[in-house]
Amino acid sequence: MSHHASNDREDETEERGFSPSRRNFLKTAAFAGAAVSLTSSFAYANGEIGFWAKDLPDEKLIDMYTTILRIRWYERTCVDKMLTDPDYRGYNHFYAGQEAVATGVSAALNNTGGVMEADLVYSTHRPSGHAIAKTVDVKKMAAEYDFRATGLNGGYGGEMHIADSSVGFMGADGMIGPGPVMATGSAFAIRARGSKQVVVNFGGDGTYATPAFHSALNNATILKLPFVYVVENNLYHQYAHYSYSTPMEDIAEAAKTYRIPGVVVDGQDVFQVYNAAKEAVDRARAGEGPTLIEAKTYRYYNHWGAPGAKPGELGAFGYDPLAISSFRPEREVRAWMQRDPVDICRNTLISWEVLDGAKAEEIEAAAKQEMIEAFAWADEQPFCNPEDGLKNVFVEGTVPARQFG
Ligand SMILES: Cc1ncc(C[n+]2csc(CCOP(=O)(O)OP(=O)(O)O)c2C)c(N)n1
């Protein structure tokens, strides 16, 4: 099966300065029907294999599809648990609908070698997708979500504090704001050590108007840090449309102020996300400084929890008097669900002859089963001990004032 074959007008494309791969990227954009603009453009690269999603080996593309589905079924299993199990203690912000963003970005990162070698991801209060794409163990994650002692962080963190530095997942963050500042500090440390790691910070559209957003980009630019800021613009922060806090339609425009590349991508198309992320990550790794990527996306559930959702059904609709779930029109939710990241990825891979329908179903069934088993395992685990809640919070001893040079 080959997805490289093409009999299009290669010569004309090259005349315009695009590599054949670049042309394929444009075709992918057209396929997805996406409105994509570059607010300030990258230098187009190079015939390097794997630079554009379409040139990646089949195995890697299938891995991306699998990751999207693993996130989707983690979410759906968790939603159903929250709706049907009165003993479930998790307090969750669901990521369903946004899976292609975390998947496309992490596919461009190195997730191995531990905290001193892997690329680092700083996540948000909506962390499941970022964690799974970064290869965090889903059983331990499910246990942590329900405050179990064998969870990722001993059951003391819950969803908003999951972390696993061994794969470079530096943690979720319940606070809106500090994440980008910690992430740039971390990028500064990487540069001071002379390591080749890259730091990615995920933030919602709600982070635009915080001082941390601007402080992070300003410092990352001035210091030319290996840093990529990915804004997941899902249109709302909590229950407010982002136009309440942002003067422009494309948050990526903020990049102009900092004289760095700002890119808008269709966040429902994992391959477009990958293309932008790969370019930004390579740029950061080469010492050329930060990039701001804005992925246009949407969440299928409420700000937190699953009011309006029904077990076994994807998405939450309608009005729930017990929660503020009527902040957006039902037809808006349904319209976005027509551009589902799972469907877009599957249809693209089928058109590239990387997958067929039967194989796609097999991958989905396995992802679903894996998550059912992860949550069932979590259910069997002991709870953490509330009395030990402050253990591992404070460090004892002294830290040398100057650690480098
Ligand atoms: C400093 C701070 N202020 C307020 C909150 C409450 N809060 C939680 S999520 C959120 C909005 C986040 O919006 P966005 O960044 O767009 O992410 P989304 O929830 O849409 O994914 C707010 C205000 C918080 N967690 N931290």
Image (cartoon, grey):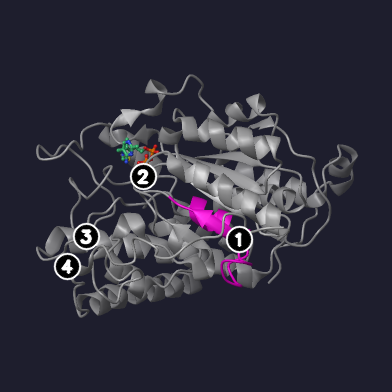
Marks counted in the figure total 4
Q: Rounded to the nearest whole Å, what is the CA distance between mark 1 and mark 3?
A: 29 Å
Q: Rounded to the nearest whole Å, what is the CA distance between mark 4 and mark 3?
A: 19 Å
Image quadrant in which the N terminus is located: bottom right
The local crowd at label 4, few if under 14, some if 14 to 19, many if 20 or more residues have their Cα within 10 Å, is: few
Tell whether position 25 is magenta. no
Read off the residue under disc 4.
Answer: 387
Q: Earlier in the sequence, mark 2 or mark 1?
A: 1
Q: Main secondary structure of the magenta part?
A: loop
Q: Earlier in the sequence, mark 4 or mark 2?
A: 2
**Residue 221 visible in the displayed image:** yes
> Picture quarter containing residue 151?
bottom left
Amino acid type at image mark 1: Asp
**In the rendered structure, are the residues bearing label 2 and label 1 in contact, judged by CB atoms less than 8 Å apart?**
no
Q: Rounded to the nearest whole Å, what is the CA distance between mark 4 and mark 1?
A: 35 Å
Q: Nearer the viewer, residue 148 or 178?
A: 178
**In the rendered structure, are the residues bearing label 3 and label 2 in contact, judged by CB atoms less than 8 Å apart?**
no
Mark 2 residue's CB less than 8 Å from ligand 1: yes
Closer mark to the observer between disc 1 and disc 3: 1
Tell whether position 117 is magenta. yes
Local secondary structure at mark 3: loop
Marker disc for residue 119 = 1
**In the rendered structure, are the residues bearing label 1 and label 3 in contact, judged by CB atoms less than 8 Å apart?**
no
Marker disc for residue 299 = 2
Residue 169 appears at what percent x and percent y? 49, 61
> Picture quarter containing residue 392?
bottom left
Marker disc for residue 90 = 3
**Does residue 108 sit above or below 219 in this rendering?**
below
